[in-house]
Amino acid sequence: MPDFVRIVPTFADPPKLLRDGDVSILVHRDTGIEYRLNATAATMWDGLREPTTVAALTERLTRQFDVPADECRATVEQFVERMCELGFVDVDHDGSESAALRRRYLGLLKRALVNLIYPEHELRPDELQANVAADDRVLRDIRYARPDDFETLVACKRDGRNFRQRVTRFSHTMIGLRRLENIEWCAGRIFADGIQGDFAEAGVCQGGAAIFMRALQVAYGQAERRTWLADSFQGLPIPTDPADEGYDLSEARQPWLACDLRAVQDNFRTYELLSENVRFLTGWFSETLPDAPIEQLALLRIDADLYESTRDVLVSLYDKVSPGGFVIVDDYHAFKPCRLAVDEFREARGIDAPLTRVDWTAVYWRKRD
Ligand SMILES: C[S@@+](CC[C@H](N)C(=O)[O-])C[C@H]1O[C@@H](n2cnc3c(N)ncnc32)[C@H](O)[C@@H]1O
């Protein structure tokens, strides 16, 4: 990490800090992820509460512990890297005005994609469904009229969870802020380390996560990479594999998971991100992916819920992922069939790169060199 790196806390709502004897435990408020801090880490964490730099943190450590500065610096770098990965802080690599603007653009975009910009709009249809003659003042001030609902909805948006047993129907992505941050973190590593290849998402629904993947390429001056979107654009298939038994999420049962290609393209247009380098692979994965004209991938994101769908993506696309590239699996913990497909594939291929947890459901691994 170069000296000019500035480390910025990402949290509007700082993590909880629990004490357990000498050990402190950081708990991410959105994801529940826990991180244990020993005395050294606790000192660094104290220094991360405000924007700071690697040099300032190193100095803080050297002052407190009797350890040479170069050792402290390595410890600080490792710790900051881990905190970024877990979404507690962010690293601003060049500190320029354009980098600050990029951060603001991406921050606003994430909130727009999960619909944290006008979240009230998602409560209004329910209110009207329950009472067509709902009071205009309740509709206008719904955030204050229904504060518990509002708070729950906002938490679901951060966390990418269902609201009232339904996927959040009116946002461009259902994956939540934390998983968008994970995409951002992976893209940052890819660009910084010069990992070659395009980005792909298999299972795009309304396109929000893929829109963010494209925005990252554009915002980092990497627009020559392609963004591939694979989807039936008519929802999930009716399950046929025994491993998917009991998981019928097809259009008849889950209409909100079936998104028209035109709507996804329009969503890209809304964000001014539709271009030649955004490519659509329309149809069932088993038909579109084996011969897809993708040459190399730096980022493969799989968000397809089922065993068969997840397996089809891995079988067709994994070998195209560059060494140092990332594979993200959205539904690993949420859907048993998806987990099975990933575990079987990793075992069959002898993949031992560790699976890192992103939040309550998603995981990723980085393909080894
Ligand atoms: C949970 S949604 C994806 C959510 C999306 N990534 C987002 O940002 O909100 C799952 C998507 O996977 C697609 N899908 C699942 N299995 C598929 C298959 N075998 N072939 C094509 N599309 C599939 C569905 O059509 C659906 O759009």
Image: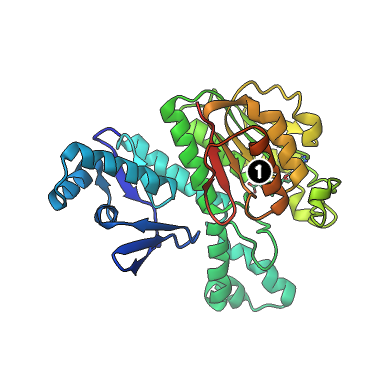
Let me know if residue 224 appears in the view. yes
x and y, in percent, of residue 343 in the image: 65, 43
Residues 177 and 245: in front is 245
Q: Amino acid at mark 1?
A: Asp
Classify residue 150 by image quadrant.
Answer: bottom right
Q: Classify mark 1: helix, strand or loop.
A: helix
**Left or right of residue 35: residue 262:** right
- Position of 238 relative to 276 (above/below): below
Residues 175 and 221: in front is 175
Quadrant of image for the N terminus:
top left
Residue at 49% x, 61% y: name it. Answer: 32
Let me know if residue 109 appears in the view. no
**Left or right of residue 135: residue 61:** left
**Left or right of residue 141: residue 256:** right
Residues 40 and 54: in front is 40
**Left or right of residue 359: residue 22:** left
Residue at 75% x, 54% y: name it. Answer: 256
- Position of 131 relative to 76 (above/below): below
Q: Is the residue marked by circle 1 packed among few (<14), some (14-19), or many (20+) residues within 10 Å?
A: some
- Position of 141 relative to 357 (above/below): below
x and y, in percent, of residue 302 in the image: 65, 41
- Position of 352 relative to 277 (above/below): below
Residues 108 and 253: in front is 253
Classify residue 329 by image quadrant.
Answer: top right
Mark 1 close to ligand 1, CB under 8 Å: no
- Residue hosting label 1: 343
> Which scheme is used to colour this image of the protein?
rainbow
x and y, in percent, of residue 220 in the image: 45, 31
